[in-house]
Amino acid sequence: MSTDTPASDTPASDTTTSVTPASVSTHILDTSVGRPARSVAVLLAARAGRDADWQSLGGSATDADGRCKDLPALPEGTTHVRLDFAVEAYFETSANKQADAQQDAPANRDSGTAGAGAFFPEVAITFAVVPGEHYHVPLLLNPFGYSVYRGS
């Protein structure tokens, strides 16, 4: 009688572990009129390490609720994320000019050149991420200022 153990029919377990990358979502609220900011282009970039080059991942635009529901996935190894919000076009549309009219400020938001666009033509937010975490980063926006925070 043999004391050898028969070979198992199941494959050997994989010793590599897969880490779920971080994920990102955002939405924009125009606090000057109390409504979502619709059709704002949002670009997503990531890097793997503080000194690494930024990798553009693509982008999306906010929907009627001010949300970007289809931002690209982050690659494995991402440590930093940058969201670029193109807000100038949003404030220049006729539907959003009422936000300017409600402000008690000069018509020229650039404080320099007549006919210039938004005071903040774009908002760029950079933040650190940890694999496996989800980061919701809302942007509260008005013609002369903005605020961001880590939401839930």
Image (cartoon, rainbow, N blue to C red):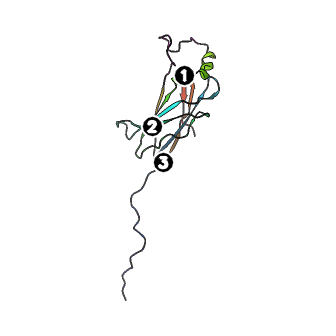
71 with respect to 49 (left or right) = right
17 and 39: which is toward the camera:
39
x and y percentages locating residue 117 in the rendered image: 50, 17
Question: Mark number for residue 145?
Answer: 1
| Mark 2 Cα-neighbour bin, 10 Å: few <14, some 14–19, many ≥20 | few
Q: Quadrant of residue 149?
A: top right
Question: Mark number for residue 132?
Answer: 3
Segment tinted magenta in the rendering: 104-121
x and y percentages locating residue 144 in the rendered image: 55, 19
- Depth check, mark 2 against mark 1: the one in front is 2
x and y percentages locating residue 59 in the rendered image: 48, 36
Indicate which disc, 3 or 2, sits on the residue closer to the N terminus: 2
Secondary structure mostly taken by the magenta-highlighted segment of the chain: loop
Q: Quadrant of residue 31?
A: top right
Residue at left 49%, top 22%? 121
Q: Amino acid at mark 2?
A: Gly
| Mark 3 Cα-neighbour bin, 10 Å: few <14, some 14–19, many ≥20 | few
